[in-house]
Amino acid sequence: MKRIITILLFCSTLVFLASACSSKKQAIEGKWQDVSGRETIEFLHDGTFKGVMIWDMNQAPLTMSGNYKVDGDKLDLVVTQPNNLTPMKWIIKFNSDKEVTMTFREGGALKRDGTSGLYRKVV
C-alpha cells in the first residue's frame, strides 16, 4: 500500500511539472513588441518564431526566424534565418498575461548578459 501511494505521488508530481512547462510555452505564444517599439517577436504554436530585433552596433533592425524552446523560465532561441547567428538564451518572467520581461542570458551580438526588456502582447 505504501508503495502504491509513493508511485501515485511521483506520477502526480510528473504531471504537474509537465503541465507547468507547457503552460509557459502556451503563455509565450503570440506576437510581442518591446515597449520602445523597435523589436517584435512572434512565437508560434509549432515551436517556431519570427521577428525583428536590434542586432548590431549600428542599432540596425534584423529580420530573423527560427525555433524556440521554453523550459520553466528559460527561453532558448535558435535562429535559422539568417543562418550565421548564434543561439540566444533568455529568462522570461510574466508580469501578467499581456506583459513579459525577458532578460538576456547569453548569445547574440549586441545584447549584454543581464540586460532585460519589457514586451507587451500585441496579438
Image (spheres, rainbow, N blue to C red):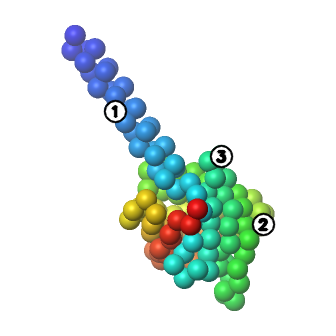
Distance from Cα at disc 3 to Cα at disc 2: 20 Å
Of the residues shown, which amino acid type is indicated by label 1? Answer: Thr
Q: Is residue 48 above or below residue 51?
A: above
Question: If the image is split into quadrants, where does the N terminus sit?
Answer: top left
> Residue at coordinates 39% horizontally, 32% vertically from top-left?
14
Which residue is disc 2 drawn over?
A: 82
Give the distance between the C-alpha atoms of the residues marked 2 and 1, in whole angstroms: 40 Å
Whichever of labels 1 and 3 marks the residue nearer the N terminus, that label is 1
Q: Is residue 2 left or right of residue 37?
A: left
Q: Which residue is mark 3?
A: 46
Front residue of 84 and 102: 102
Inter-mark Cα distance, 1 to 3 = 26 Å
Q: Give residue 38's quadrant in the image.
A: bottom right
Question: Split into 4 quadrants, where in the image is the C terminus?
Answer: bottom right
Say which residue label 1 marks: 13
Who comes first in sequence, dot 3 or dot 2? 3
The residue lying furthest to the bottom in this view is 58
Residue drawn at 68 percent across, 82 percent down: 56
